Amino acid sequence: ARRERAGRPFVRPPHVAADARTRNPLGTHRPAAASEEPSFQTGLPPVQRHLHIMSGKGKGGRAEASPSKRPRTTADDDDFLTTFQKSSRLAYIGKWDEVWAEVLDARAELDAAPAKPSPPSPGRSRVVFHVDLDCFFASVVVRDRPELQGRPVAVCWGAPSGGGGGSSEISSCTYEARAAGVKAGMWLRDAFKTCPNLVTAPYDFDAFSAAAVAAHSCVLDATPHVCGLSIDECYADVTAAVADAHAFDDKAGAAIVAKRIRAAIEEATGGCAASVGSAESPLLARIATKLAKPDGHVHLDRASAVERLAELPATFLPKIGPKTGRKLEPFGLRTCGDVARAPLSTLQKALGAGKLAADTQARARGQDPSPEGWALQRARKSVGAQCSYGFRARDAANLAELAEKMATQAWERAGRLDVRGRVVKIGVKLWVALKKNQPFDASCKAGVGHGRCEITNATRSWREKGGVAVGSAAAAVVADTGVSFVDVRGLGV
């Protein structure tokens, strides 16, 4: 619409076919049904899709409804939570364990649950792989759109390449985009300034899930001892496979097994690359993966690991991101070697007197502070659902209804993951606006974000049998907080 008003013609995005076909999760194509929206709109999330449709002119030159009259929040649209859960990147990433459950359930039909990994043979070391799919979302997008090979591509909810969509956050980008200065977490408007020829692509959660299941199944083909970390990475104990691959050399055996797994993943996913780090502990394996990227394998034995670590930035260590790294700099702690050699008291001044300082120093010295032991999958302690974008309540009754929906979503998900218990602790998390009694204020992203908030938490025990429904129980917990419905900007159960 903006182009039309400026006298510029609308240009069809390069990824949309002229025959308006839509892609299904398997990567094939089917004709668009008559009731579906035109294909140039299907890449947008529901909220943005409304804006895209209504800001232009409809068929026959008729103006569509005003943006202010179309559903944009939970107060306007009773189905907002459902569409948000389907289109939200964070909601999807938060459900990565469901993807792993699908992988493990399929494997359970073939194999019995594996015992713990056997200890290494005399003279050999334990070997752990950290397998990480390279720029995963972007890799799947480029796989499905070969014309984007070699071009800077970013995955986000935003305008097709060329501008606009400044409030969208990039979640994944190709190495060509990274070379131009684009990175995950960057706002799209800033990315276009850095890389004017950046191509944006929407999320395809079905395609991401299918590729993840295929990739993780390849790891399980090599060893039954796999622990999922996220939708695109996992740990695997490959001690036995490495010993079978090479009679006496762990490094050579690890290289053989890693090459097999990486080739299998590329074939199974249709072209997605994976990097593999190998070492005697999960900590060092994860660090080795950072050194292996992109599309490679690095093995760190105990002797070389400490030497390599000493030269690396402190931000290479787990739980030391850019923000925490800046806390270390005033104390002259810039590399892992600096952290390893520093007195613990200095680290405690920078990071606090808690466990983080001691654990960070142990990691910098190549020691994994995590407890020993191995599990096929980490035991889940909680299941939840939350929404902090477009969340507004019409009144107290509507807030209670939204809490019931959230609790029902979480309870159904617990059923899918088979983790329900007889006694459940229901916890609610409320984003409460600091600027009271105003449904919208200048700090709210796109007018419907949560803006500046404080977090309120409350809990209550609940039994499934002989009591109220889980949704009603969650609504009661929200009511007990005493927070006014007009100040609630987000809810998690």
Image: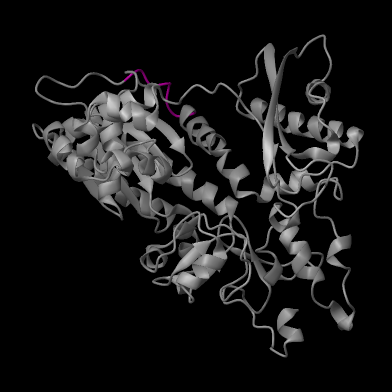
Classify residue 168 by image quadrant: bottom right
Report the front residue among 183 and 238: 183
Point out the image quarter for the N terminus. Answer: bottom right
Residue at 32% across, 42% down: 330
Residue at 43% across, 21% down: 113
Pick out the residue farthest to the top: 466
Residue at 80% across, 51% down: 440
Report the front residue among 36 and 93: 93
Which region shows up in magenta? 109-116
Is 258 placed left or right of 180 in the picture? left
Query: What secondary structure prevails in the magenta region?
Result: loop
Residue 228 % position (x, y): 44, 34
User: Is 71 one of the magenta-colored residues?
Assistant: no
Residue 477 % position (x, y): 78, 21
The relative height of residue 443 versus residue 54 in the rendered view (above or below) is above
Residue at 67% across, 77% down: 19
Classify residue 305 by image quadrant: top left
Is 60 placed left or right of 249 in the picture? right
The relative height of residue 302 versus residue 293 in the rendered view (above or below) is above
Report the front residue among 34 and 376: 376
